[in-house]
Amino acid sequence: MNVRTIRPVKGLKGEVTIPGDKSISHRSIMLGSIALGTTEITHFLEGADCLSTIDCFRRMGVEIERKPSCILVHGKGLRGLTAPASTLNVGNSGTTTRLISGILSGQNFATTLSGDASLNSRPMKRIMTPLNSMGAHITSLNDNDCAPLRIEPGELHGIHYQSPVASAQVKSAVLLAGLYAEGPTSVTEPALSRNHTELMLQGFGACVATDLHTDGTATAHVEPCKELFGQQICVPGDISSAAYFIAAALLVPGSELLVRNVGTNFTRAGFLKVCKDMGADIETVSQTFEGGEGRADLLVRHSRLKGTVIEGDTIPTLIDEIPMIAVMAAFAEGQTVIKDAAELKVKETNRIDTVTAGLKTMGADITPTDDGMIIEGTGHLGGASIQSYLDHRIAMAFSIAGLAADGETQIIDSQCVDVSYPEFYATLNLIGI
Ligand SMILES: O=C(O)C1=C[C@@H](OP(=O)(O)O)[C@@H](O)[C@H](O)C1
Ligand SMILES: C=C(OP(=O)(O)O)C(=O)O
């Protein structure tokens, strides 16, 4: 057990540079591995989840070099992966598990995927249903629709899949299998989820398109592909990681913090919109675009926040930031309602429960609901001993809560931040904590 003590601070000053985006880092290894030629990735996120993705592809014969300045993936081509000697370990990573299942469905060898206790309790039927209807042979070894998953070779054909959830992991699994299928594949989702797979597939030479419908639903299409071609990828900073430092500056009186290299892809940027709705003072200092992905430097100043309502199509654009938003809401004035977010229940933990438990322990007025939570902002929280439940987002959100709380906060099992942000505590120290 690793316990981190957080004490209240006065004003955060200086600048932080945000590490690479987790979603884009995973995809760069996956597409690089099944492309022809070498993919050079800079600003790759060396978090435990992305290292699990590297390990899986290395074990299927892909040479992946970790250099000080970049990652080099020597791709094997769409059909060049080889059978791993044993079970692929996907660790704590839902993204690795679901996306790789799409790729493995199209291989001519069998694989088994398994992860840690949290991962092996997360729902996999959401990918098994569409992939098996494409002709894949995926079974849950414990017959509980969770990993360990066994993926046997199958002949894939394109489908149109109406996804019941707005999930980029489901959409991406189907699109990646679609590369190996006979005939076109498409996925309609109830609201647009992050589109990194579509953007990166286009960059690697696949034929991909997205239709945004007037009712808010979205359809992504992919054509079967002969080969993908290795690319140079500069990964933008992860807005999900940036959220902690943006929130810290907003919550700690006297702060003025420059947060550099924040990914601003519109399918991910809901956190920034919600901050503005809550009255945050965030200035865009510069903005650039590369490979369809935007990135910005943001100057964030301490602000008096007010409550807001977060619902509907906005939810997929900030799903991983909800623990942090809930903490901000507790420090805000007035009520915050978060709804349409039942997906929170199937993350590394049930984040409706774990956010509620943490905030209650710190004295907040929070009511969990079936698809979100209602928080009556009181303007302050009290320091407390907080369980991370080994969920990196809970550990980081409550560490930031501790900076602005009255008294000392302990984060139990804080080492789980390594999943998405290994330098999190070192970066906090850099800005004066
Ligand atoms: O595709 C991705 O990279 C991700 C999609 C989201 O999950 P869902 O697709 O399950 O919503 C998100 O919560 C996860 O952290 C990363
Ligand atoms: C839900 C998350 O990741 P994953 O689904 O990849 O485990 C997350 O990073 O918050």
Image (cartoon, helix red, strand yellow):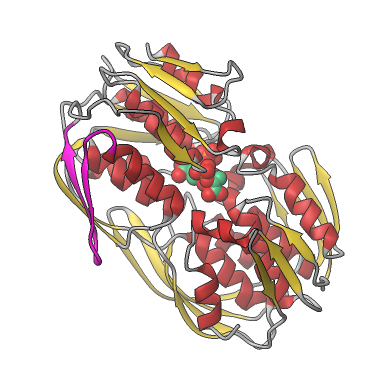
Query: Which segment is the magenta one?
Result: 59-77
Q: Is residue 92 above or below residue 271?
A: above
Instruction: Say which quarter of the image contains residue 52.
Output: top left
Percent position of residue 376, x then y = 85, 60
Q: In this view, does 385 lie to the left or right of 208?
A: right
Q: In which quarter of the image is the N terminus?
A: bottom right
Asked if 205 appears above or below 10 in the picture, the reply is above
In the image, residue 366 sits, relative to residue 31, either above or below, namely: below
Q: Where is residue 100 in the image (x, y as percent from the top left)?
A: 38, 32
Could you tell me residue 220's position as x and y percent? 39, 31
Q: Can residue 138 be seen in this view?
A: yes
Camera-side residue of 318 and 241: 241
Q: Nearer the viewer, residue 255 or 220?
A: 255
Q: In which quarter of the image is residue 183?
A: top left
Compared to residue 205, the image places residue 258 above or below, namely below
Inspect the magenta stretch and tell me whether residue 75 lies in it: yes
Left of 58 or right of it: where is 382? Answer: right
Q: Quadrant of the C terminus?
A: bottom right
Q: Which of 165 and 141 is in front in this view?
A: 141
The reply to whether residue 376 is visible in this rendering is: no
Q: Residue at x 33, y 19 (%)?
A: 110
Q: Residue at x 52, y 33 (%)?
A: 217
Q: Please name the residue shown 69% across and 46% down the image.
A: 351
| Number of marks in picture | 0
Residue 123 colored in magenta in the image: no
Q: Residue at x 38, y 64 (%)?
A: 295
Q: x, y percentage for residue 7?
A: 71, 79
Q: Which residue lies furthest to the left in this view?
A: 37
Left/right of residue 14 with respect to residue 63 in the rendered view: right
